[in-house]
Amino acid sequence: MRSAHPAHDGSGSRPRPLRRLRRRTLAALTGLAIPFAGMVGLAAPSQAADAPSASYTRTQDWGTGFQARWTVQNTGDTPLSNWTLEWEFPAGTKVTLPWEAEVSNDGNRWTAKNRSWNGTLAPGASTTFGFNGTGGGAPTGCKLNGVPCEGAEQPEDTPPTAPGTPAISKVTRNAATLSWTAATDDKGVKDYEVLRNGTRVATVTGRTFTDHGLAPGTDYSYTVRARDTAKQTGPFSGAAKARTKGKAAPAPKSKITMGYFTEWGIYDKNYQVKNLVTSGSAEKITHINYAFGDVRDGKCVAGDTEAAYGKVFTADEAVDGVADRPDQPLHGNLNQLRKLKAEFPHIKVLWSFGGWSWSGGFGEAVKDAPAFARSCHELVEDPRWADVFDGIDLDWEYPNACGDTCDDSPPEALTDMMRAMRAEFGTDLLAAAIAADASEGGKLDRADYADAAEYVDWYNVMTYDYFGTWAAQGPTAPHSPLTAYPGIQGEHNTSSATIAKLRGKGIPAKKLLLGIGAYGRGWTGVTQDAPGGTATGPAAGTYEAGNEEYRVLAEKCPATGTAGGTAYAKCGDDWWSYDTPETVTGKMAWAKKQKLGGAFLWEFAGDGAKGDLFRAMHEGLR
């Protein structure tokens, strides 16, 4: 979902409002502040004072790819209104993911043009744009606004080579010793960074390291990279695997308590991965769905790359209170999730793709399901963050039905996709979010969810949004009723009816998770306290009319009654429905009785500062 999950459709194909996702496009990404190690100086002829200049820096190299940055500076004495930079890369070197510039190519010739906000440069001012790429070549044939650039077109210093793959020795229950062959560098290797499961655990000047404090009977992966006297880091070594002696502590048998962490929540909502810790939710979480990646051109692709792996977090924002270093291999939410898992190793993380606004690409992708699955696996298992993820979640809204867009895939397309995903991901976790529409001939009847269930570990059943302000004049109704209540518009519009329909199709109860919404739906112009009243339109909300987060409603409009096992509130002319810790407790008791696999929360940012709803979900399933 490009904007948000809230447009899950519980019944029918009614139009749904969207939450706006701020700063989600590549055009809005900000460049990384990284030291100019290995800079190529490229300026206009003779470094003339009245001409702009450009410089190129390869800022990161992870073996299979790299990150680079161009800096454009106005060295003249008059403003520069627009700029166009051209260069050539040798065959095999190319830009894959740019930001802060419009980048295109004609063969090996590449062109970058300013965006609307960074084209005007006052005298002495500069701007940067960056990109990820593949290949090992350096730029040549540079032109800035049509004027050939001067200067050396190769770095004055080259980064170190990769050290040898570590050899593992002296493995005990709690420690392992590594050794490796030296990297080479034109000016000398200063030290080596040792990474365990993708996280730096030591910097050493020698070529051996003993890692202490490990858990018994546990698998670990180690890589090493060198840093030279110019503070340049080279590519990583190959990965070495180690398993400590002894038996691992048995995992407790418990219900799944999962929640969605939205990529865009770090912006306007200021909800960081760190908030999972400060709220007290982290210790109760079994799984996190990181939402969302996109489905585009038949492939899984990252959503907001700046939020995912580009943003440099301050110490105040970081899970462990340690600020990101500009030259570290991974930034953004994914690095913070890595830190979270280091502190709470019981948590599993799935990368979630699709959602309401980004489901339009599934229909094309599943036409070649094996190729689609390969693309998803390659992205999820990218060596920069492979240790962060334990599997994948597919939020296709909806196969052979309408959501934000309409899909005409055959009913078996969902099964084909899940079969291909299971073949590609092996024993890794595989989950999917599915509709709650239990009506006859509705969404749950339009795709073969029963056959697809063979391949998934579980379904996230979106048991919310049965009612809302797409019916602007009402009748008012709880958006997530567990059971029917007097006057309900359609007895199939309940969580219990949805679960019954899925179980009736032969899907095991243990593969069904009950959905809890951390938000409310509301109307204004309402005079009736109980459900079923008329309205004049949607109530005002912080981000979207007719929608408000639980953390706001709990203070602004406390619950005044319940219907169908969920809460509602009448505040002045406004009428809201939402779940409270008390109604969540009741729903969890019902889920346990039904022997469901657990429950999930959409989404963490809407919960209270102390994780009220998630705590009730966790305690109710114990």
Image (cartoon, helix red, strand yellow):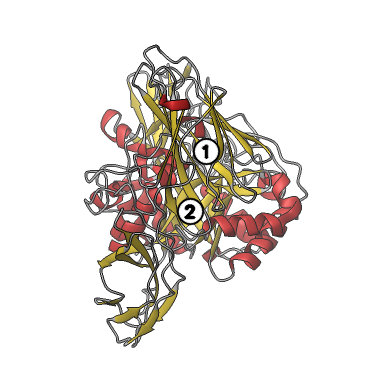
Residue at x 66% of width, y 42% of height: 361
Question: Where the N terminus falls, by quadrant?
Answer: top right
Residue 570 seen in the figure: yes
Q: 568 or 134: nearer the eye? A: 134
Q: Position of residue 299 (x, y in %)?
A: 64, 49
User: Residue 405, located in which quarter of the rendered image?
Assistant: top right
Q: Position of residue 421 (x, y in %)?
A: 63, 61
Looking at the rendered structure, the secondary structure element under dot 2 is strand
Question: Which residue sits furthest front?
Answer: 46
On screen, residue 353 above or below 76: below
In this view, the mark in front (2 or 1): 1
Residue designated by label 1: 98
Q: 178 or 197: nearer the eye? A: 178
Which amino acid is tagged 2?
A: Leu
Which amino acid is tagged 1?
A: Pro
Q: Position of residue 229 (x, y in %)?
A: 29, 57
Residue 529 seen in the figure: no
User: Residue 431, located in which quarter of the rendered image?
Assistant: bottom right
In this picture, residue 304 sits left or right of residue 621: right
Residue designated by label 2: 514
Q: Position of residue 239 (x, y in %)?
A: 45, 71
Residue at x 57% of width, y 44% of height: 96
Looking at the rendered structure, the secondary structure element under dot 1 is strand
